[in-house]
Image (cartoon, grey):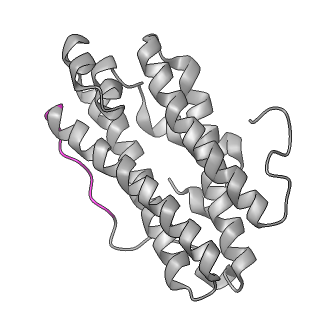
């Protein structure tokens, strides 16, 4: 799955959810949210939990690589470069927690790919890089939006909504940097 090939938000959500197969367990999301005590109380996890965590980890690793591409492009002015590095740091934190959670659940975390299929030839200006990153974040918002209502455990929904909020803020800030309305409508899809 690649958010970087500019899929529609609905297609990104379907791809994310389709790869995962099932939703996260309470233990997995509690660990993701940094709540080890809650995770210990919420019971064991299954191989399906590891599968969805690895899907999310793969997406985070791809986002880290995409922000690295933008940072190294020499197309970003200093304030925008700083923003890209900050957002990349958020994705690194997500990836670190995902990998630790996978390990705690007895799984093996996926590794970053040696090469990602990014539209490098289309990145000719700072605005191109910002649009690329904004589409990435929009796809993440859409994926989490689709996942939140699927959780039976309310703790899962809260954790997914927390990540959704972070991705939505990234998307809004990137739109603002492009000179676009940061919040284009009253609803996201």
Q: Which residues are magenta?
A: 105-112
> Whole-percent x and y of residue 13?
60, 39
* Residue at the far front in the pictured view: 79
Query: Which one is in front, 41 or 102?
Result: 41
Q: Position of residue 32 (x, y in %)?
A: 33, 34
Q: Is residue 68 magenta?
A: no
Q: Position of residue 22 (x, y in %)?
A: 41, 25
In the figure, 112 relative to 105: above or below?
below
Residue at the image point whose x is 27% and y is 52% from the top:
110
Residue 78's place in the image compared with 38, above or below, is: below
- Image quarter of residue 77: bottom right
Q: Is residue 107 left or right of residue 140?
A: left
Q: Residue at x 67, y 59 (%)?
A: 134
Q: Report the residue at 25% width, 46% height from top.
A: 99
Q: For residue 37, say whether it is visible.
A: yes
- Above or below for 127 versus 144: below
Q: Residue furthest bottom?
A: 74
Q: Is residue 11 above or below residue 90?
A: above
């Amino acid at each position: 799955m690649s958010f970087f090939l500019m899929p529609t938000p609905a297609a990104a959500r379907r791809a994310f959810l389709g790869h995962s197969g099932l939703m996260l367990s309470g233990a997995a999301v509690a660990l993701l949210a940094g709540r080890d005590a809650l995770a210990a109380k919420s019971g064991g996890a299954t191989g399906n939990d590891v599968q969805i965590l690895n899907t999310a980890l793969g997406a985070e690793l791809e986002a880290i690589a995409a922000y690295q591409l933008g940072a190294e492009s020499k197309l970003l002015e200093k304030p925008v470069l700083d923003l890209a590095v900050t957002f990349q740091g958020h994705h690194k934190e997500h990836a670190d927690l995902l990998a630790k959670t996978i390990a705690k659940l007895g799984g093996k975390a996926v590794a970053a790919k040696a090469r990602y299929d990014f539209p490098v030839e289309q990145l000719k200006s700072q605005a191109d890089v910002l649009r690329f990153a904004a589409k990435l974040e929009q796809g993440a918002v859409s994926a989490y939006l689709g996942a939140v209502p699927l959780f039976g455990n309310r703790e899962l929904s809260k954790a997914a909504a927390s990540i959704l909020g972070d991705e939505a803020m990234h998307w809004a800030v990137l739109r603002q940097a492009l000179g676009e309305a940061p919040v284009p409508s009253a609803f996201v899809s």
